[in-house]
Image (tube, rainbow, N blue to C red):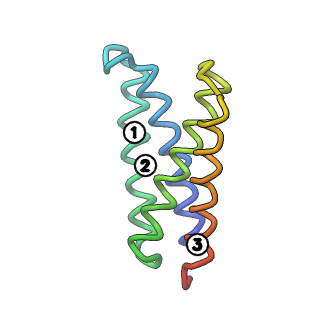
Amino acid sequence: MAWIYLGVAGLFEIVWALAMKQSEGFTRPWPTVVTVVGMAASIWFLSLSMKVLPLGTAYVIWTGIGAIGAFVLGIALLGETADALRLVAAVLIVSGLVLMKLASPH
């Protein structure tokens, strides 16, 4: 169950990152509300996963899910660039996440 909580926490990480971008510096009310609620939900699910998972594993995977999700959706939804160097960096992040999961005792 801890891994499911961690995945949900990562998804909320993506939600709040996208909403924060749309809030335009917290000047737009609804994206600001989504940002704050997404942050709170993300932290809460992360804390549930940390009851079982090691701190380092949970935190790295949580931030990695958020980083890769925000990267992919930034390209898909916001028209951000997808040049070769950024794609290589994303592959390296995903590789690190896979290795961290494989190295986890849980």
Is 17 above or below relative to 56? Answer: above
Return the residue at label 3: 1
Horizontal side, residue 18 vs residue 44: left or right: right
Quarter of the picture containing the N terminus is bottom right
Label 1 SS: helix
> Is 84 in front, or is 17?
84
Residue wearing tag 1: 37
Using the image as rendered, state which of residue 19 and residue 56 is in the foreground: 56
* Quadrant housing residue 35: top left
Q: Earlier along the polypeptide chain: callout 3 or callout 1? A: 3
Of the residues shown, which amino acid type is indicated by label 2? Ala
The residue at which mark 2 appears reads as 41
Question: Looking at the rendering, in which quadrant would you find the C terminus?
Answer: bottom right
Instruction: Check the image and report above or below for 39 versus 104.
Output: above
Q: What x and y, as percent, mark residue 92?
A: 60, 53
Q: CA distance from mark 2 to mark 1?
A: 6 Å
Q: Are marks 2 and 1 in contact (CB under 8 Å)?
A: yes
Task: In this rendered view, identify the residue nearer to me: 75 or 45.
Answer: 75
Locate residue 23, reporting x and y percent. 40, 20
Return the mark for residue 61.
none
Mark-to-mark CA distance, 3 and 2: 16 Å
Q: Residues within 10 Å of mark 2 (few under 14, many from 20)?
A: some
Q: Position of residue 32 (x, y in %)?
A: 37, 25
- Callout 3: helix, strand or loop? loop
Q: Residue at x 53, y 63 (%)?
A: 5
Residue count near mark 1 (Cα–Cα under 10 Å), binned few <14, some 14–19, many ≥20: some
